Image (cartoon, grey):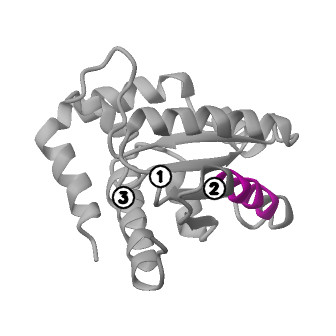
Amino acid sequence: MILKGKNLHQIIKQTQCWLDSVIIKHNICPFAKRERDKGSIHFCVDENQDISQALENLVIECERLDKQPDIETTLFVLAQLGPDFNDYLNFLDIANQLLIEQGYEGIYQLASFHPEYCFEQSEQDDPGNYTNRSPHPMLHIIREKSLEKALESYPNPELIPERNIEYCQSMGLKKMQEMLKHCQNRK
C-alpha cells in the first residue's frame, strides 16, 4: 500500500500531536520544546514495506542532517513497518548497525518509539512503557553532539528515564492510553 497526500498528512499530524501533547506537555523529553519552538524538528514518513528500502531512506535522512544544520533532529516514522514490536526491535538492531557501517557512530544515535513499546522486565500494561509509546513505529535520529551539550546543562540527566517511568506510572494506565489514543485518532 502506498500512502499519499491525506494519509501522509494524517500520520504527521498524529506524530505532532503526540510530540506536543505527550512528550512536550508532560516533559518526557526536557529538550523537545526548545527544538519544536525553533521549528528544527524534521518529520519524515517512510512508506516502504521493504525493509532494505526503509534502511536506505534512514541513511538518506542522516545525509539530510549532514547537509542541513538548521534541522536539529528527525522523527523518522515507519508507517508500513507493522504492529509487531519484536519485528520493530529487529529493525532497530539492523538500523543501529547500519549507522555504524555508514560512519555515523558518534554522530547520530537512534531513540526508539513504538505503539506497543515494552521495556525488558516490564509487563505490557505497565504505564511506564508509555515513555516510549508513540502513534506509529518511529526512530528519533539525534545529533550526538547536540545531545551531549544539552545534557551538560541539565541536572542529573541520568535520572530522566527513571523520572519519566515513575511519572507515567503516577498518571496511570488509563490516562496514558487515552493520551496516545487521542493522537492516534487525529485526522
Q: Whole-Å distance between the Cαs marked 2 and 3?
A: 22 Å
Q: Residue 81 carries which label?
A: 1
Tag 2 residue: 54
Amino acid type at image mark 2: Ala
Tag 3 residue: 18
Residue 64 appears left or right of 58: right
Q: How crowded is mark 3: few (under 14 residues within 10 Å), some or many (20 or more)?
A: many
The magenta segment is 54-64
Q: Position of residue 74 (x, y in %)?
A: 62, 58
Amino acid type at image mark 3: Trp
Q: Whole-Å distance between the Cαs marked 3 and 1?
A: 19 Å
Above or below, comparing residue 185 to residue 144 in the picture: below
Image-quadrant location for residue 173: top left
Q: How crowded is mark 1: few (under 14 residues within 10 Å), some or many (20 or more)?
A: many
Q: Is mark 1 on a helix, strand or loop?
A: loop
Above or below, comparing residue 133 to residue 56 in the picture: above
